[in-house]
Structure formats: C-alpha cells, structure tokens
Image: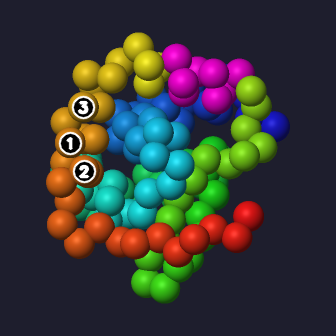
Amino acid sequence: MLTPHEAFKCLADETRARATLLIAEHAELCVCELMCALQDNQSKISRHLAQLRAAGLLLDRRQGQWVYYRLNPELPVWFNDVLRITSEGNAAWLSDSNARLSQMDGRPQRASRCC
C-alpha cells in the first residue's frame, strides 16, 4: 500500500512530478512522448519512469517497439485526488509540456484497448 511518505518522495522530483501528472491527464504515454513533452533525454526519462514503476505508481505495457506507462489503477483514492487537484490548480505549469506533446511529429499510434 502506498504511503504518503512514498508518494510525496516520488513526486518531489520535478521530472517525476511532471511525468506523473502528464500520464494522469493523458491516460498513458510512452517514453518518446515524455521526452518531447519534457524536453529531456531518453535515459533520464526512463530512469524516472522506472522509479515510479518500482514505487507502484505506474504500470507499463509493450506495444511493438513502444512501452506505454499509465497510472496504477489500484492507487489509493487520496493519491488520485492529490494528482487531480494538483493538475487542476496548476494547469499553467504543464501548459508548455502539453503544447509540445500536441505538436509532436511521429507520435506513436495506440492500438484499441480490449479492456
């Protein structure tokens, strides 16, 4: 079970906080999308995603060459509330990242989900 200490420790890093909020907003994103949105390199993004996955905040799935990350659906309600309130109250903080993401060339296409 995710504790407040673990959750806030994960979100204390700006890259992890931004990535988590973007994933929460877009349902799922792959490493290349986060690289574009956050203007950072693959190794740094992947390292932070691995930390979020190890903490139980994110799950991943492979589709061809892409690995997509999404929030763990078993996260506590209070944590989802924190993400929602943070996102709603700080839209400007992510506006540049969202703009870059919406203008990304070659964005991977997701297959229809079966569940």
In this picture, residue 59 sits left or right of residue 30: right
Q: Residues within 10 Å of mark 2 (few under 14, many from 20)?
A: few
User: Residue sitting at 58 percent across and 21 percent down?
Assistant: 82
Q: CA distance from mark 3 to mark 1?
A: 6 Å
Q: Nearer the viewer, residue 48 or 85?
A: 85
Q: Give the x, y percent position of residue 3.
A: 73, 28
The quadrant of the rendering that contains the C terminus is bottom right
In this picture, residue 63 sits left or right of residue 42: right
SS at badge 3? helix
Q: Nearer the viewer, residue 109 or 36?
A: 109
Mark 3 vs mark 2, foreground winner is 2
In this picture, residue 1 sits left or right of residue 4: right
Q: Amino acid at mark 3?
A: Ser
Above or below for 15 versus 70: above
Q: CA distance from mark 3 to mark 2?
A: 10 Å
Q: Nearer the viewer, residue 41 or 92?
A: 92
Q: Give the x, y percent position of residue 8.
A: 56, 26
Residue 84 position by quadrant: top right
Q: Residues within 10 Å of mark 1 (few under 14, many from 20)?
A: few
Q: Give the x, y percent position of residue 19.
A: 41, 44
Q: In the rendered image, which residue does mark 2 sit on?
A: 102
User: Residue sitting at 49 percent across and 85 percent down?
Assistant: 64
Q: Amino acid at mark 2?
A: Ser
Q: Amino acid at mark 1?
A: Ala
SS at badge 1? helix
Q: In the rendered image, which residue does mark 1 sit on?
A: 99
The answer to whether mark 2 and mark 1 are in CB contact below 8 A is yes
Residue 18 position by quadrant: top left
Magenta stretch, residue numbers: 78-85
User: Residue sitting at 25 percent across and 50 percent down?
Assistant: 102
Q: In the rendered image, which residue does mark 3 sit on?
A: 95
